[in-house]
Image (tube, grey):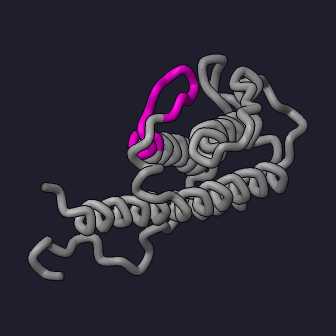
Amino acid sequence: MVDTTIVSGCLNELKQQIIYRIELNYPRIHKCLLNLNDNEICSRVNENSNSIANLILHLCGNITQYIISGLGGNEDKRFREGEFAEKKDIKIAELDKMIKETAENAVGIISALGVNDLLKIYPVQGYKLSGIAILIHVTEHFSYHTGQIVSTTKALKNIDTGFYKGMNLNKKNNSI
């Protein structure tokens, strides 16, 4: 017999870790945007690369489709191809607001999910996924593209983002 208290506790911990990582990514993107100008966010290294603007639009589309629509029950209005279309007139402030609001909305929906919501199967983007699978997908996807944005920013500006400033990352596991 499965102890539902343990299962509930484990799923609650999963939700908290997902929320933590979503809330970790937005400030990293925000910091990058503060270091860039409108031309830099719209530039592509080559025709096979995406601009930072495209990556942020893509993240908003993905998070909205999977979490806000898929788990939250809102209408799916995603136009994925448009996320990758060349953008020349989009502004940093607009992108920053979009990704912040999208992440905040997703966190609100995730916070309200119960055990049954996490175990339920949802149709999203042609897939049939559990709530858990959706949360893992969005977390991985958000982190992956945040890394691309950070890497592009570092390459364009030759800066250290300082995400771990003041932290000793050389501590051994047994020295907590």
Q: Is residue 77 above or below residue 131?
A: above
Residue 72 visible, this angle: yes
Which segment did they paint magenta?
Answer: 122-134
Task: Find residue 120 and report its horizontal and vertical position in percent.
Answer: 44, 41
Residue at the image point whose x is 49% and y is 62% from the top: 19
- Based on the picture, tell me whether residue 81 belongs to the magenta stretch: no
- Based on the picture, tell me whether residue 123 belongs to the magenta stretch: yes
* For residue 142, side relative to residue 108 (left or right): left
Residue 52 visible, this angle: no
Residue at the image point whose x is 19% and y is 75% from the top: 171
* For residue 100, side relative to residue 142 (left or right): right
* For residue 22, side relative to residue 83 (left or right): left
Task: Find residue 3 and report its horizontal and vertical position in percent.
Answer: 19, 63
Residue at the image point whose x is 82% and y is 31% from the top: 87
* For residue 46, side relative to residue 146 (left or right): right
Residue at the outermost right position: 89
Task: Find residue 104 and report its horizontal and vertical position in percent.
Answer: 66, 61
